[in-house]
Image: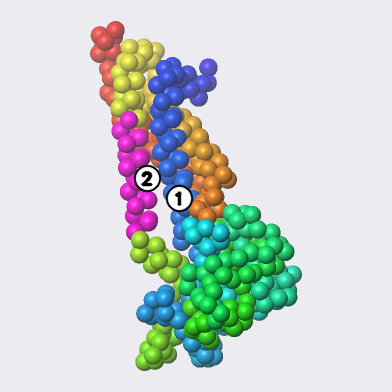
Amino acid sequence: MTFLTLARRNALRKPMRTLLLVFCIAVAFLIYGLTASFLSGTQGTAGANDDVLGVMNKSGRGHTLPIAYQRRISSVEGVADVAYMSRLRGYSEVERNVVVANAVVADDIARINSESLGLTPDLLAALKQGRDRVLVGRALADAQGWRAGQRIDITSFNILQKAGGRNWGFEVGGVFEGATASTDTYFMLANYEYVNALRARNVDTVDSFVVQPAPDIAASALAARIDALFANTGAPTKTQSEKQFLEAFLRQFADVELIVSLVVGAAFVTILMIVINTMLFAVRERTFEIGVLKTLGFTNQFIAVLILCETLLIFVLGGFIGVALTKLATQVASPALGLVLTPAVVGKATIITVSLGIFTGLLPAGLAMRTTVSNAFRAR
C-alpha cells in the first residue's frame, strides 16, 4: 500500500463526512471563482488598459468637451495619437436592456485600439460603408442575438435628435471579438459624423478623448501635462488611464474589491473552522491507531505528513470541483456579467487550495504528534 493510498483511505473512511467537507470547500471556491472572475472580466478592472489615457470634462461624465481640443491635445509633448468619442446610451426594445454606442472616427480609433478590440481592416471598411453602420462587440452581439446586416433600433437616454425623437436606427456592419477574453466587448462603435449631424444639442462636442502616449513616456506625467493645458479654460479636463477610470467609476457604487475580499475571506475562515474541527475529531477517533503506528516504529513526522496529506487531498478535491463549477458558470452566464476565468485566477485558486490544505492540517497533525503510546492504548 502506497503512502497516498493510505492517505486516501483514511480521508474516505467516513464517506458522508468527507463528502460534506468537500461540498463546503467547493462552495467556498465557487464563491471565490465567481468574484475573482468578475474582477478579472470586462466589468472589473483587471483587464483594463493602464497605458491608454482618457481625457474627460473635470465637472463629470455628463459634461462634454469641444472637439477642437483634439488639435491642442495632439500638440502636447509625449502624445503619440489622439481620438475622440461621444457616448450614446440607450436601450433596445425594453428599458432594462441597456446598450452603449461609442460614436468615433473609424481611422482615428483604429490607430489606438484596433489591436485591443480586434478591429480588422474588413471591419473598419464595413463601418465606413454607411453613416448609420455600427460594429458590435461580441459580448453584446451574443446577448442581443444581433448579426451582421441586421437593422437595429436604439432608444437614447441622453441624445435627442433635431427632429425631436430619441430613436436611432443602425445597421450592424460586423462584430469585433476583442483581443482577449477580458476585453470589454459589450458596446458598439458608431460613426461620429452620423450622430453629430442628427443630434439637437452639443454639436461638435465629445464625451472624451482617447490618448496614446509616446513610447517611454509615463502616462501619469502626460496626464498632468494635458490637464495643465486646459486648467484655466471654460472646460477643464481630468485625464486618467482606463483602469483608473473604471476603478473610480465602480467606487461610486461601492468598493468592489473590498467587498469581494470580505466575502471571500469570510467564506474561507468559515471553511477553515469547519475543517479544522472535523479533522481534530477524526484524529481523536484514530488515537488507538496512531499509538499502534508509533509502536510499529513510524515516526511522528510520518504521522504528521499522513494527516497533512489527508487534509490536502480533501481541499484539492473541493477546490477542483469549485473551480470547475466556476468555469461552467462563466460559460452559461450572461455576457453582460463579464465573467472571465483567467489562468491567473486558476493559479491563485491552486495556491490558496494548497496553502489552506496544509494550514488546516497543522493543528490535527500537532495533536497526533503529541499523542503518546500509553495514552493511545488507554483510549482503547
Determine crowd level at label 1: few under 14, some 14-19, many 20+ residues with C-alpha closer than 10 A: many
- The residue lying at 51 percent from left, 21 percent from top is 5
Q: Residue 311 location in percent, x, y?
A: 41, 29
| Residue highlighted by disc 2 | 264
The question of residue 49 being in magenta is answered with no
Highlighted range, magenta: 254-274
Q: How is the image coloured?
A: rainbow
* Pointer 1 residue: 36
Per the rendering, the mark at residue 196 is none
The quarter holding residue 118 reads bottom right
**SS category of the residue bearing label 2:** helix
Residue 295 place in picture, x, y as percent: 35, 12
Give the CA separation, mark 1 to mark 2. 9 Å
Q: Is residue 58 left or right of residue 349?
A: left
Viewer-proximal residue, 21 or 347? 21
Pointers 1 and 2 in contact (C-beta within 8 Å): yes
Identified by mark 1, the residue type is Ala
- The residue drawn where x is 42% and y is 19% is 16
Q: In the displayed structure, does residue 283 sit left or right of residue 325? A: left
In the image, is 59 to the left or to the right of 7? left
Question: In x, y percent, where is residue 141?
Answer: 62, 58
Up-down relation of residue 371 to residue 52 (above or below): above
Please tell me which residue lies in front, 307 or 35.
Answer: 35
Q: Image point 48% across, 69% down: which residue?
A: 157
Where 214 sits versus 134, above or below? below
Q: Residue at coordinates 43% horizontally, 69% vertically from top-left? A: 245
